[in-house]
Amino acid sequence: MSPIRKFSSGRGGNPTVRNIDNDAPLEMRQEIVDVIFSIAEHTQSWPQPRQIYNIACQSLGIQAVGNPAAGLRHALGRDIAPVDWQRVYDLICRLWLDFETQGFGTPYREGINRVLAGYGIAWELDGNGQLTRVLPPVAQAQVQSAIQELNAPRFQAAAHLFDLARDAYDDRPRRDRDACANAFDAMEAVAKLVFNKPRDTFGQVLRNVPQSGSLKTEIIAVLDAINTLRNRKFGHGTTFDLSSAETDFTYIACVGGILLFAR
């Protein structure tokens, strides 16, 4: 287990609200440097501090110093302070590959995620070295379940649409309209396939569902309301004006719809 923020990490929970998605606080940048060197300084082979320092500098577009007087930690801490906030997250993803290749991907990821959580950052580093937007645990479990369900070959088209939705949801800045539209399209694709109605609209599919008795009437009404929301707010030719919270609701509701139909 990573020693980073071992006391203040909340025993694995998120100690703060995850609402910072357009900044990399200066204090957090220094803690990121600590994560990097806390691993590199204790390896007997590779990556060692000098190598990691060189990679980090070049990744940030900075010329590495041959022998910084105050040490490598100080040098990188100084160099990372003034860069644009997006470049800090670029560096996090860039270094993951080097640590993962040498078997240190897990402690690196754990340390980085504890720091991100401590500062309320809206993303965390996943097992593939990508920054993904943090969702409440129950919602995140639903997303993972949807990914697993859509792995079935018959759902290939829907899986592609859901990938597009996730990419838009995780983007910086988040592309709210694309996240809603693609999540809905993925749900619609699953429904059309399950009920063998490839030419029907989602509304037409829903009107045929009660005959099979597979979904409660009240659930169908909820799904129909989401269809109405799509037609009015994020379908073709509409004006998108959903708030951030309304985008979250729509995205997760479509994930729930995918699971309802796929199962």
Image (cartoon, grey):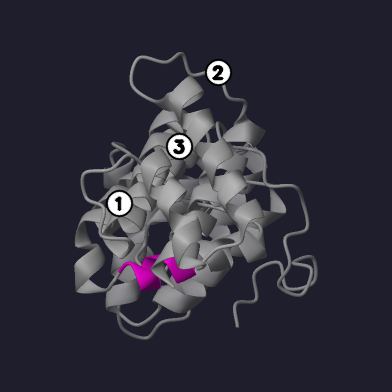
Badge 2 crowding class, 10 Å Cα cut-off, few under 14, some 14 to 19, many 20 or more, is few
Quadrant holding the C terminus: bottom left
Point out residue 47 in the picture as x, y percentages from the top left corner. Answer: 32, 73
Residue at left offset 50%, top offset 68%: 214
Where does the image place residue 204, in percent across and percent down from the top left?
38, 42
- Magenta includes 148? yes
Q: Earlier in the sequence, mark 3 or mark 1?
A: 3
What kind of element bears circle 1?
helix
Taking the spot 38% from the left edge, 66% from the top edge, the residue there is 147
Residue 195 higher or lower than 40, as above or below: above
76 left or right of 19 in image: left
Q: State the CA–CA distance, disc 3 to disc 1.
A: 14 Å
Residue type marked 2: Asp
Q: Residue at the spot x=47%, y=40% of the render?
A: 80
Q: Which residue is mark 2?
A: 241
Few, some or many residues within 10 Å of mark 3 (<14, 14–19, 20+) = many
The residue labelled by disc 3 is 180
Give the residue at mark 1.
189
Placement of 112 over or under 177, stated as above or below: below
Is 130 included in the stretch rendered in magenta?
Answer: no
Q: Which x, y percent locates residue 56?
A: 35, 51
Question: Which amino acid type is marked by label 1?
Answer: Ala
Q: Are marks 3 and 2 in contact (CB under 8 Å)?
A: no
Instruction: Name the quarter where the N terminus is drawn.
Output: bottom right
Question: What secondary structure is found at the residue carrying circle 3?
Answer: helix
- For the magenta stretch, what is the residue range? 144-150
Mark 3, mark 1: which one is toward the viewer?
A: 1
Q: Quadrant of the rendered structure where residue 177 is?
A: top left
Residue placed most toward the observer, 249 or 235: 235
Image coords of residue 74 (percent x, y) = 53, 50
